[in-house]
Amino acid sequence: MEPLLNTILSLIEAGWLSLLDYLAAHVLLCLVPAFIIAGYISAMIPKEVITRYLGPRASRWVSYPAAAFGGFILAVCSCTVLPLFAGIWKRGAGLGAAITFLFVGPAVNILAIAYTGAAIGMDVAIARIVLSISFGILIGLIMAYIFRDQEALRAAEMEDSGIFDHGARLQPAVWIVFLLLMAVLIVGTLQVGFLTATWINLSLPVELPQGLASALDRASLNPQGALLILLIVLIAPVAYLGLENVLEKFNRWTYLVVIMVGATILFAAPVVETGSLVFGITGRFFGELILLALIGVIVARYFERDQLASWLWETWKFVKQIFPLLVLGVFLAGVVKMLIPGTLIQSLTGQNTILANLVAVLFGVFMYFPTLVEVPIARMFLDLGMSRGPLLAYLIADPALSLQSILVTGRILGRQKTWAYVSLVTVFSVLAGYLFGIFLTIV
Amino acid sequence: MLSIKVLGSGCANCKKVEQITQAAVQEMGFQAEIVKVTDYSEIMDYPILATPGLVVNEQVVCAGRVPTKPEVTTWLANAALQES
């Protein structure tokens, strides 16, 4: 009994430690703004900004890039991807552009990219964007070519319903706040001298009680990390009270949650050494302070209450939908890491070979993970010794292909086209990982 | 009687649309039948590009976003006017 209990306890500890690692300051500095930006895009930027370039009369030179970049604005929520995909195919720019959108959409959304950058590395995040977009366009073009005869027949009987023709005009303030929010994200994560440098050292005039200090040490937490986790835990109930009915009315919890989230971003910016109470106030902190103040002023001056309400609601919706699964995924990834022998991962995928990339891709197809959870899973593989090429192959294939998405796509497209799509995605994901791996050895 | 359909696979926004519509119907004291359409092929029969969608008497009034209650009230009133 005793050994079993010890094993279980050490597994729980491993899961808990990986959770703490993910709630650390540098991850929060990217995840919190990323959720806010995702909510902002969803609420404030109308889909017509992109969809009017995806209509049946759009030139190929416009529709394919629009479909590829459209994921950034349209596909933050996976539940909107499939109707849009079907719409683009049946009434819009055709099979190729629709396939491009289907492939790129889940991969290039702001949450996935920001999170990949913070948890795995900017090299993989940038490769994920560049290779997803270019290979997405390529796969779309190949599909359109393979099925050109069927598509020509279909185009003849397609009616022009005009739903793609609506344009959208946005106030300049919407774009300005969007850019400022992106700046919050970038200032929070960019590793450049004047942002990371410490300008002032603030020493807290209190001392931690001995017991608390050693408890934090054992969990390898510093006081900043502990307070951030406390903030996150406190935000959860306040957000529920303040945001669940925000579309109907604002209450005092609504204002409180906005202030607390701002405080989290600011509080995550300083650097604190483990075991010390000295807060190094970095350039990051000042940068975030200025940006948040600017956003506050512009929002108060130019945004209407309804706009603000739907921004808050969309953000809360994403948090509710994604964050609990993410926490669970991170915990389980920590546990599983203890159970899988590193030698197995290393022998299968430790080298950047075609076979290793294929193994990584097939794993991504057969395992289904909810949005964003692919990132901690990838991190787990990286820690266990997976090479960065197969890692990227996995990250590209996993959101695009799962048994579930293959089934749904099959219902919309039919079996033949779906299998062609699945094979193409497999081949190109393997290729993407392989090329990225080779690229890394050259530079 | 108004026929109202909420199009969506069951994500948080679709539930919100249903909630808001229900509240608007009750407030106005209309007779209305609210149906949730969750099947993709049925949803795609309507000219919308993104869920959630709101359909009043087989006319799509809103798609791809959550409308405000005053908006829904206006659409319902218009549809009721056309009926009578």
Image (tube, coloured by chain):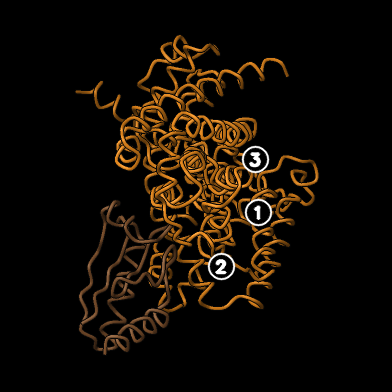
Chain colours: A orange, B brown
Q: Is residue A214 visible?
A: no
Judged by depth in the image, the label closer to the viewer, 1 or 3, is: 1
Instruction: Tell me how far mark 1 sits from mark 3, CA to CA.
Output: 28 Å
Q: Which chain carries label 3?
A: A
Task: Say which amino acid is labelled 2.
Answer: Ile
Read off the residue under disc 3. Answer: A273
Can you say which quadrant of the picture contains the C terminus of chain A? top right
Judged by depth in the image, the label closer to the viewer, 2 or 3, is: 2
Can you say which quadrant of the picture contains the N terminus of chain A? top left
Q: Is residue A95 visible?
A: yes
Q: What residue is drawn where x is 38% and y is 38%?
A: A329
Tell me which numbered mark, 2 or 3, is placed earlier along the sequence: 2
Q: Do the residues labelled 2 and 3 touch (CB within 8 Å)?
A: no
Instruction: Tell me how far mark 2 sits from mark 3, CA to CA.
Output: 26 Å
Residue A182: image tag? 1
Element type at mark 1: helix
Task: Say which amino acid is labelled 1.
Answer: Met
Q: Which chain carries label 2?
A: A
B17 sits left or right of A264 in the view: left
Read off the residue under disc 2. Answer: A259
A199 sits left or right of A73 in the view: right
Q: Residues within 10 Å of mark 3 (few under 14, many from 20)?
A: few
Q: Is residue A192 above or below residue A162?
A: above
Q: How crowded is mark 1: few (under 14 residues within 10 Å), some or many (20 or more)?
A: some
Q: Quadrant of residue B2?
A: bottom left
Tell me which numbered mark, 1 or 3, is placed earlier along the sequence: 1
Q: Quadrant of residue B60?
A: bottom left
Task: Say which amino acid is labelled 3.
Answer: Glu
